[in-house]
Amino acid sequence: MKRKTPKTCIVVAIIIMLLMFSVGAVAPARGSNATSIQFGCELVTIIRDNYGVPHVFARSKEGLAFGCGYAMAQDRLWQADVFRRSAFGNLAEFGLATIEQDYEIRKWGYSREELREIYEKWVPTKPEARLKEMMRAYVDGINFYITQAQIKALFGDYSMIPLEYLPGVVTPDGLLPIEPFTVEDCVAITVMMAWRFGGCGGSELQYAAALQALTAKYGDELGWLIFNDLFPQNDPGAEVTIPSEDGCYEPKCSSSSSFQFNFPSSISQVYQKYKEHEEEITQLFDSLGIPTKFGSNAWMVSPKKSQSGNALQVGGPQMGHSIPQIVLEVGLHGAGIDAVGMMMPQGPFILIGVSEYGAWTSTTGVSDVMDTYIEVLNPNNHTEYWYNGQWVPMEVRTERIYGYKKLTYVDKLVYRTVHGPVFAWDEANHLAFAMKTPYYKNELAAEEGWMLFQEAKNIWEFQEAVKTIQPSHNFYWIDRMGNIGYWHAGTFPIKPATGKGGRLIDDRLPLWGTGEEEWVGLTGFDEMPKCINPKQGWLANWNNKPIANWPYAESDAQWGQGHRVKRLMDLLAAKDKFSFEDMNLINMDAGYNHIPGMSLLHYLVSAAEKAASTNPDVAAVLPYLKAWNHHYNDLKPPRWPDPEATYDDPGLTIFDDWYNRIRTAVFADDIPSDIMKVTEWQLSTLIHVFDGEQSKLPLNYDYLNGEDRDEVIVRVLEWTVGNLTQKYGNDISTWLTPVRKVKFSQLGALPAPTMHYMNRGTYNHIAEMPRWNWLKPPKAVNVIPPGQSGFIHLVDGNIVISPHAYDQLPLYETWTYKPVLLRFSSIWEVRESVTILPYIK
């Protein structure tokens, strides 16, 4: 290699200095801290408000995207890097995962070339929105920041480098490279989010393993009946978002009358092995602050139910809590967009937020858009599978997975069939298991609607955007015309009635991949449950069932009677008119609501009242049970954040102990232990057991084994009293439960805070759209704890944490919010900094 001459080094140094001036010349603007560059085709302005939220102003959509990318990198570069490495399965290079964990991720993903192909083949439905151009400009904005940061670092100024990249923080030695972002990176993150938040269903192995365990214990006929008790296809008691007067599907048979379990006997072992891998990756992602959870809620009130005569909305996507938070906030202003809300690092799009025209939010839909296929392998060659009468070779790709700092690597093979990625094997029985979804290799088009919401001008434009969504999501909109709307979006597989050997197809169980059980079609927009301006004047959803008798779900086990959404519905039905402040009070009430207590406390109190006259122990605890309002109440000292804080009600402590025991007492003698570990079916089934002949879902088996319901309830309550007396003593007033706490997952170098538990959105907004009054901005507030920024860095050798890393946590814990700033004057009034960037197309 030829050594550089001193003259060459001088030339290189001059070029670097020129680059520095071209990307980072500082010229303070009057009255602000401003970075200004005086050339380029378009000047993009980023104004940060007093919570550090960046508001991007530009003439073009590409300019907005460029500024958005730059602002995101300022706040969350390390987080975005971890997200893309998670999406690609490149975490081991960072020292954040093992090679085997990276391999588990890559089984499901695409190669870089395929991601580029997904982007190139994507033809947006609305070309004038310039979505592809915005994604490219967004990448340019991120890389502009990276270039600035790296050039300054060459001269010893690390003030723009996130601390996590420096030696000794995440890795023991050496400056970690900051690789430029590409469009493929953004596509990879989009794919990851599409599968994690909208990729619902695909639980057929779990259901098959449960059915296998039940039939092994009870025989085919009775095992099948109990299976349908626990995992019904249709629970008539399930709470639904769309009221019956606004729509209903034809009733679906709860289960087929005949049973034919023609699946391999090893399916339980296959499921357990797959489950172990899945749980390991979930734990890994949780530790990195990557979304793995859903539980989002939303509700809306129409003008006729609003005190102001305006439509109201609460949005609360629940994705867990990390530091920095999973989402960040941005404002986009210009080129037909004027919106503020939450985004993720994959693109310059406000996924949930408020605009001058409307407010929108989303929850995971939970309907079935993924199916497990069992592939029959060639005994002589396990890379071939039987399909449509012949052995077909699997698609095989070699993935080179690097270890830490690329010092080592391992080559691993990734397999696919015509149905999708192979995620599990049973080679002893010559079987493999693949996952099929309607949007495979088409995730950008399938998620396009999310990118269009920020420029929707009315409910019909919003609906047109919803039409493009193929994963399973719920969407909600309110606007200045007083409209409120709900859509259960997704493209759902239509399966044949019969399959291999003439068996009846059941949505809960796997399909054979031999070509005999292929989908016969996909649903379209007409089948999508939707409701605009319902007669009752409100709509609520918390990942519950969208509409009565909805057929496109594996099972109603997650949607059964007693669903958490019931509390929202009870509160919305109990009042004639709601104010803006009432929407927050509903949020608080639901956030502290005890879900099993809401549905079961009255059974416990009723049984205890009957027994109290002859049972002193029951009589002693009965007043405390009657006094409890099925909420986690922390109003009496010691209160959080006192480390000794407890909830106020002994009734809560008594109920919790009883609830844990009653489930075991009712089900453990009848249900195999592996199924008992699955909790999703237990509350609704217990309600049906207790309702007896009045149950909305008549059961096929007597889980009380001939005993009277109230006698079982009281017997378990006696066990509870004995246990709590031994634990706390005889003074029932001291039987208090410590306040539950949540520690944020630590993604990078910022220390993780702890807060008290609230069942609410990771991001929360409350919005009111002034009806027809365009002079008045929307009234909206939001909060993202712990704060907007995830930036921690070095200045003159000292560690500096952004003032906006934790400043929203006190708001969140006290159920208060900051204003959503949509108009320039309100943003400028509380500005903290102004940055002007050149965007050259």
Image (spheres, rainbow, N blue to C red):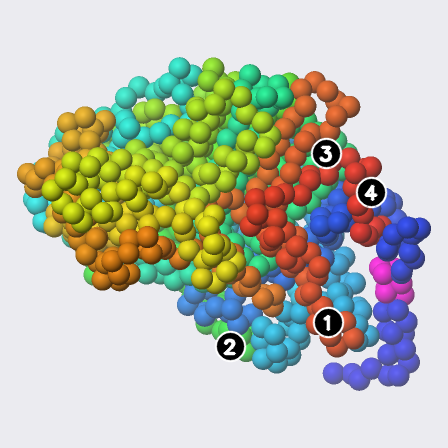
Q: Residues within 10 Å of mark 1 (few under 14, many from 20)?
A: some
Where is residue 133? Give x, y as percent: 70, 42
Structural distance between the alpha carbons of marks 2 and 3: 47 Å
Structural distance between the alpha carbons of marks 4 and 3: 18 Å
Specify start and end residues of the magenta stretch as a single range: 18-24
- 21 part of magenta stretch: yes
Structural distance between the alpha carbons of marks 4 and 1: 29 Å
Q: Is residue 652 visible?
A: yes
Mark 2 residue type:
Thr
- Residue at horizontal 10 percent and vertical 37 percent from the top: 708
Structural distance between the alpha carbons of marks 1 and 3: 36 Å
Of 16 and 835, which appears nearest the observer? 835
Report the residue marked by disc 2.
Answer: 408
Of 345 and 433, which appears nearest the observer? 345
Q: Secondary structure at mark 1?
A: strand
Where is residue 88? Give x, y as percent: 52, 58
Whether residues under marks 1 and 2 lie with C-beta atoms below 8 angstroms apart, the answer is no
- Image quarter of the N terminus: bottom right
Image depth: mark 1 or mark 2 in front: 1
Q: Which mark is residue 337?
A: 3
Q: Is residue 374 left or right of residue 12?
A: left
Q: Which mark is residue 828?
A: 4
Where is residue 16, by image quadrant?
A: bottom right
Mark 1 residue type:
Leu
Q: Secondary structure at mark 2?
A: loop
Where is residue 494, by image quadrant?
A: top left
Mark 4 residue type:
Trp
